[in-house]
Image: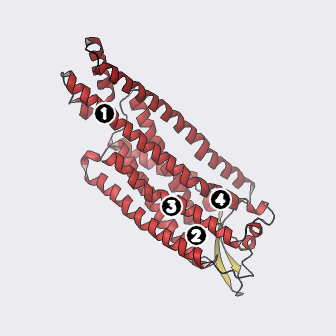
């Protein structure tokens, strides 16, 4: 959601022409990201829903990530293209004005929560196999997805209150509507800071800790397999079988054989699959944070820019829009990249 404020940009009384290179650059990349992202995410959702073998906890939440990406693409990309041509005016109406910023933050929160719960499940399955293999069946997974969206919806409701839809006089002397998001009240400042803290520092720190423990556990498992593959000790073979029973899924459990060579092969395959899954999740997480970080910083600057005297006059009209378009393109690119990364798990 752009922070369109005609007083700050000084466009109400002086019409400024949007540079053609920014319009072309933004329009082409917005459109490219939109079509690639929509096609890829619809494909991910369709494949998971059609193939019964893919209907597991992790893939359901990956599908949920795709739903969040689709919502973001359908609401925010059109408004991004609109802003390139509208010169700060808002032609999409009052409802859309209040929805764009709200959906942007809601889908972002739903995405990070989905990644968080996938990681939690993998953490308990890999690092705490004696406690639980996995608590999540299909019914619980769908309920969890509903809770994720409810939490995201309620947590980001204040962004609706931060959005304003009002009339402004532009250079043609006519009153036209503009849409802006501001944090010019004390409660808004606390909310934005708290939201950023939870979104980045708190959840991010917990995720880093869990991935550290997961990689450590997988490293131990891999080391044990290498040692046991060279040993004929019956004690080590028994330990290997126990480890196999503790870490494989229920479907794989049926394949466990009394043949040690088969068990060794199954264990190697299973550990490799888990390593691929964790690497995929790490890529999704890092990509998400890297892509959203520039936009978060830019949005914070915009929300608090009124406290900086002459901020917009100092950076200039063209640089403002270059930063505006670039940071948003960076974030939306994440929606187009995700389906490519998910292919590691779905395959």
Q: Which residue is mark 3?
A: 332
* Residue depicted at 58% across the width and 69% down the height: 97
Residue at 37%, 63% in the rendered image: 39
The quadrant in which residue 277 appears is top left
The quadrant of the picture occupied by the N terminus is bottom right
Residue 153, visible in the rendered structure: no
Q: Residue at x 36, y 22 (%)?
A: 224
Q: Residue furthest front?
A: 230
Q: Quadrant of residue 220?
A: top left
The residue at which mark 1 appears reads as: 270
| Spatial CA span between label 2 and label 4 | 19 Å
Q: Earlier in the sequence, mark 1 or mark 4?
A: 1
Q: Nearer the viewer, mark 3 or mark 2?
A: 3
Q: Nearer the viewer, mark 2 or mark 4?
A: 4
Of mark 3 and mark 1, the one earlier in the sequence is 1
Secondary structure beneath disc 2? helix
Q: Is residue 285 above or below residue 177?
A: above
Give the alpha-carbon distance from disc 1 to disc 4, as whole Å: 43 Å
Q: Which numbered disc flags the more N-terminal residue, 2 or 4? A: 2
Q: Secondary structure at mark 3?
A: helix
Q: In the picture provided, is 295 more to the left or to the right than 122?
A: right
Q: Earlier in the sequence, mark 2 or mark 1?
A: 2
As displayed, is residue 18 above or below residue 331?
Answer: below
For this orientation, the residue located farthest to the right is: 309
**For the residue carrying disc 1, how many other residues have a C-alpha within 10 Å: few (<14), some (14-19), or many (20+)?**
some
Judging by the rendered image, the residue that carries numbered circle 2 is: 97
Q: Nearer the viewer, residue 319 or 177?
A: 319
Q: CA distance from mark 3 to mark 1?
A: 34 Å
């Amino acid at each position: 959601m752009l922070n369109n404020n005609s007083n700050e940009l000084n466009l109400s009384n002086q019409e400024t022409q949007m540079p053609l290179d920014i319009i072309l650059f933004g329009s082409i990349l917005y459109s490219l990201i939109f079509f690639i992202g929509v096609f890829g995410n619809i494909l991910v959702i369709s494949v998971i829903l059609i193939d019964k073998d893919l209907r597991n906890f992790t893939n359901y939440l990956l599908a949920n990530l795709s739903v969040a990406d689709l919502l973001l693409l359908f609401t925010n990309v059109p408004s991004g293209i609109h802003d390139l041509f509208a010169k700060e005016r808002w032609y999409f109406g009052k409802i859309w004005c209040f929805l764009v910023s709200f959906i942007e933050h809601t889908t972002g929160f739903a995405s990070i929560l989905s990644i968080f719960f996938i990681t939690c499940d993998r953490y308990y399955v890999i690092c705490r196999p004696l406690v639980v293999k996995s608590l999540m069946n299909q019914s619980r997974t769908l309920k969890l997805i509903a809770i994720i969206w409810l939490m995201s919806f309620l947590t980001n409701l204040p962004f609706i209150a931060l959005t304003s839809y009002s009339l402004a006089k532009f250079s043609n002397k006519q009153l036209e509507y503009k849409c802006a998001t501001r944090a010019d009240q004390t409660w808004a400042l606390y909310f934005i800071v708290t939201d950023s803290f939870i979104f980045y520092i708190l959840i991010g720190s917990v995720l880093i800790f869990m991935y550290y423990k997961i990689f450590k556990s997988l490293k131990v498992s891999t080391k044990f397999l290498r040692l046991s593959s060279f040993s004929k000790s019956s004690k080590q073979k028994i330990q290997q079988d126990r480890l196999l029973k503790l870490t494989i899924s229920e479907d794989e459990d049926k394949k466990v054989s009394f043949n040690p060579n088969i068990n060794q092969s199954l264990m190697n395959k299973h550990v490799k699959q888990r390593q691929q899954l964790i690497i995929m999740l790490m890529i999704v997480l890092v990509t998400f944070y890297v892509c959203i970080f520039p936009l978060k910083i830019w949005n914070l600057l915009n929300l608090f820019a009124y406290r900086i005297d002459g901020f917009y006059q100092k950076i200039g009209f063209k640089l403002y829009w270059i930063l505006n378009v670039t940071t948003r393109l960076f974030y939306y690119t994440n929606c187009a990249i995700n389906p490519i990364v998910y292919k590691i798990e779905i395959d």
